[in-house]
Amino acid sequence: MKKRSRNWLMVGFLTIVIAKYEEVEASRRLDEETNLDSDPTLQPHRTAYHFQPPKFWMNDPNGPMYYNGVYHLFYQYNPRESVWGDGKLSWGHSISYNLVDWVHLENAINPTDPFDINGCWSGSATILPDGTPAILYTGCDPEKRQVQNLAVAKNASDPYLREWIKSDHNPLLAPVDDIKGDYFRDPTTAWQGPDGKWRLIVGSEICGHGTALLYHSEDFVSWTKSHRPLHFSKRTKMWECPDFYPVSVNGTNGLDTSVIDRSSKHVLKASFNDHDYYVIGAYEPETDAFSVDTDFMDDNVQLRYDYGVFYASKTFYDNAKRRRILWGWVTEADGESDDTKKGWSGLQSFPRSILLDESGKQLTQWPIREIESLRTEEVNIQNKEIEGGAEFEITGITASQADVEVSFHIPNLDDAELLLREWRDPEALCRIKNASAGGKIGPFGLMVLASDNLAEHADIFFRIYKGNDKHVVLMCSDQSRSSLREEVEKTTYGAFIDVDPSQNLSLRSLIDHSIIESFGGRGKTCITARAYPKVAVGNAARLYAFNYGTESIVISSLSAWSMKPAQLSPLHERTKSQI
Ligand code: DQQ
């Protein structure tokens, strides 16, 4: 080799080494700045068994799927900072064998092409009949118009599906006619009708009404817009992240998205007004007619997946365990500067399996049973009366990282207070009648993330009222005293639960440092809340059961467990046997 070319080679080599060194240094500096590698006491609010990327901003769950023995979760990810920022988001990607422990991979999709240069936004995965996993996602183009794109796994035999190839045909769908460029996003998992054609819906707002635009395709590449949307509502604005899937009536299994079974019903979910609302109805695959039992924002019934912090959710069908699983984005309730200091923002709810309730009128949700693999120390209490005005501590477990299941018996329902007409809004009622406002039957429930002197605590509780022809059960999640820090948001959430309180009334709460996911009436009503205690952190956190009503309540049974942390780490930090 000539001397000059040897020198060039040397320069090239050194440039690569320096660039690599700078990259590693920059990442080390970022870790240092964001405390992520530091003492865990500096990260008291980072969760132990909820899904989080190693750092920075995460919002919606995207394209969850089960493929060849591996669960995939993609998510809206800002790989540069802990805020949503300029919206130039990527699809983060992690895989799991049990939906509890996760391996973080490189981003699956980045905003690098004209059809997504301003952001790769939410979308869904569909497994095509030949086994190809396909992702449909929203791209923001150079004019910030929203368009729908396709990406397929480059190598379906890679167990982790690490590389994704964007289609040459992108964008597949562009906003035309009456669709506004900024109201056209979040394609669903596609399903096949009896005619073999694919269908999918995209969230939109047409003439001021929230709309699920319907498209058809024979080849998954060219799509035609149907004249009639699948559904729309005059009572709502833009629909984000729609989801549409069948649920079996009286069945205990979930259904795959394309299953057409005359005895099933269909669920349509749309995200708007900061909540995930759903309706249940009958879907005719021949005509694509969808007739709802009760509509969005009906005066009497407004169904939500979760009455707390839970948004832009997505379900997928797990054919290994024949269940439909729901993920939802749980945002932070502290400030943006806190998120920058923490170095991260956003959680995913613990995955929930979702079924149609036996009433047929609503869904029920329950943490997937794999969560039980994290349970360690256990305490059990049976038949314990809590007199009016009393509380008692549940000891023997790690109260900041716990799973608690309790079942209450109400010995005397006769003296329940009357539900006044002006108390129709359950959230407002929970605010007026917070945990410290005494009542007759209730408030009773759990006091979590509590400090020694009870200066800090979050409360999940019930109150029972007498309605017109039956008892009414109110469930509240009161954060008003959850942190001594004044600046964090402490919204109180509430909902009525359609249960008969003469039967046992159950409550389950997943407590994980700064998140409390609560399931009332075996998952009929779910409320997720955030709390950022100053004192009640780590081992200083305590757990109580309480009853501040005048009537005694009996805990028929209570089981509580400390939870082990789930394993979440990047691929390069794992040995093969750890995956
Ligand atoms: N988040 C995405 C959008 C979606 C919104 C952008 C919902 O695709 O509509 O990050 O949170």
Image: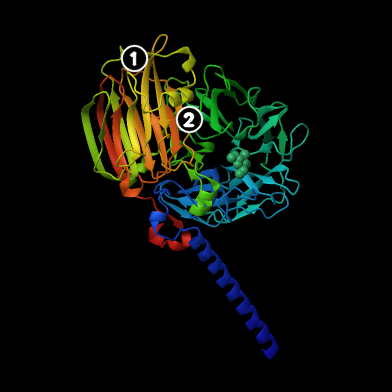
Q: Quadrant of the C terminus?
A: bottom left
Q: Residue pushed farthest right? A: 177
Task: State left or right for residue 535 relative to residue 267.
Answer: left
Residue 324 on image: x %, y %: 47, 36
Ligand 1 placement by image quarter: top right
309, above or below 298, in the image: below
Query: Where's the N terminus, which quadrant?
Result: bottom right
Seen in the picture, residue 281 relative to 25 is either above or below; the reply is: above
Q: Which residue bears the numbered disc 2? A: 307
| Residue in view at x 27 percent, y 36 percent | 559
Mark 1 highlights which residue?
A: 416
Measuring 51% from the left and 44% from the top, which residue is drawn there?
65
Q: Gap between marks 1 and 2, in whole Å?
A: 24 Å
1 vs 2, front mark: 1
Could you say which quadrant of the image residue 511 lies in?
Answer: top left
Q: Say if residue 70 shows up in the picture.
A: yes
**Residues at marks 1 and 2 touching, judged by CB atoms closer than 8 Å:** no
In front of the other: 318 or 213: 213
Q: Amino acid at mark 2?
A: Tyr
| Badge 1 element | loop
Q: In the figure, is residue 466 to the left or right of 310?
A: left
Q: Is residue 356 visible?
A: no
The residue depicted at 61 percent of the width and 79 percent of the height is: 14
**Residue 93 picture location, percent across and down:** 53, 52
* Residue 274 rendering spot, x and y as whole percentages: 56, 33
